[in-house]
Amino acid sequence: CNSPGTVKSEGPKLVPFFKATCVYFVLWLPSSSPSWVSALIKCLPRGGSWGWGKEGPGVENLLDNSPQYSLITKLAFSIPYPLLLPGLLMFAVTHMLYASAFGMRPLALRTGLVMGVLSGLCYALLYPGLSGAFTYLVGVYVALISFMGWRAIAGLQLAGAAWRWTELAAGSGALLFIISDMTLALNQFCFPVPYSRAVIMSTYYAAQMLIALSAVESREPVEDYRLNKAN
């Protein structure tokens, strides 16, 4: 488990993120008339999380590449419908980067099987509301985000000496990301979800925060970190 000192030292880095999140929810600009101003305000919290955990071993791609795609994606989803498709594609790239950063060890096939079944059920629920290219693209997207969730949860160990709070943050963040995107998809393609905007944005911001925090590693040597992951 990571030293409490790590949390204390990294805590101040969360301040810009929390301030930007508060700005978004306090202003709560109407979604009925999208604009570049509202889109930029929506992206502020994600920009506030840049730079977390870059000292951590083996996870550089998590924060060096994914935030840029996430910011562009959030912009695409924040303005009129024509950019929904590019936004979907950019989010897919983001999940591929996250999955790559989480890695393929341990494999955790049972976890992958559970995620596969759940993703199939989610797509079956969305399918009647899909049409055109979205019929296939949403299916691919569901598979990608489920794969990302599998790789995030696969490394989670809640017992034993190898327990790490960063792995708990990664798994929790991935699940919140799935909840956020599933709510967005249901609201977009199937039926109006009550308080959808509040649910989507709160789970999205929490997911981004937790996934970013999962890259904050303790100051232990890189060799020890890799040994713990291998065990």
Image (cartoon, helix red, strand yellow):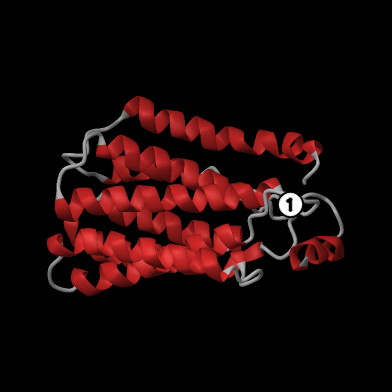
Question: Where on the picture, by quarter, is residue 198?
Answer: top left
Mark 1: give few (<14), some (14-19) or many (20+) Cα within 10 Å: many
Q: Quadrant of residue 195?
A: top left
Residue type, mark 1 in image: Glu
| Residue 90 can be seen, yes or no | no
Rendering coords of residue 92 (x, y %): 39, 67
Q: How many labels sit on residues?
A: 1
Left or right: where does residue 148 sit relative to residue 118? right
Tag 1, which secondary structure? loop
Residue 82 relative to residue 179: left or right: left
- Residue 160 in percent (x, y) is at 77, 51
In the rendered image, which quarter contains the C terminus? bottom right
Tell me what residue is drawn at x 56 percent, y 35 percent: 16
Residue of label 1: 217
Residue 72 visible in the shown view: yes
Which residue appears farthest toward the top when viewing the image?
26
Left/right placement of residue 23 relative to residue 65 reads left
* Picture residue at 22% right of the left edge, 58% below the top: 125
The residue lying toward the viewer, choosing from 50 and 230, is 230
Image location (x, y in percent) of residue 200: 33, 43
x then y, percent, for residue 197: 28, 39
Vertical order, 195 against 218 (above or below): above
| Left or right: 160 as drawn, with respect to 141 | right
User: Please, is residue 33 above or below residue 228 in the view?
Assistant: above
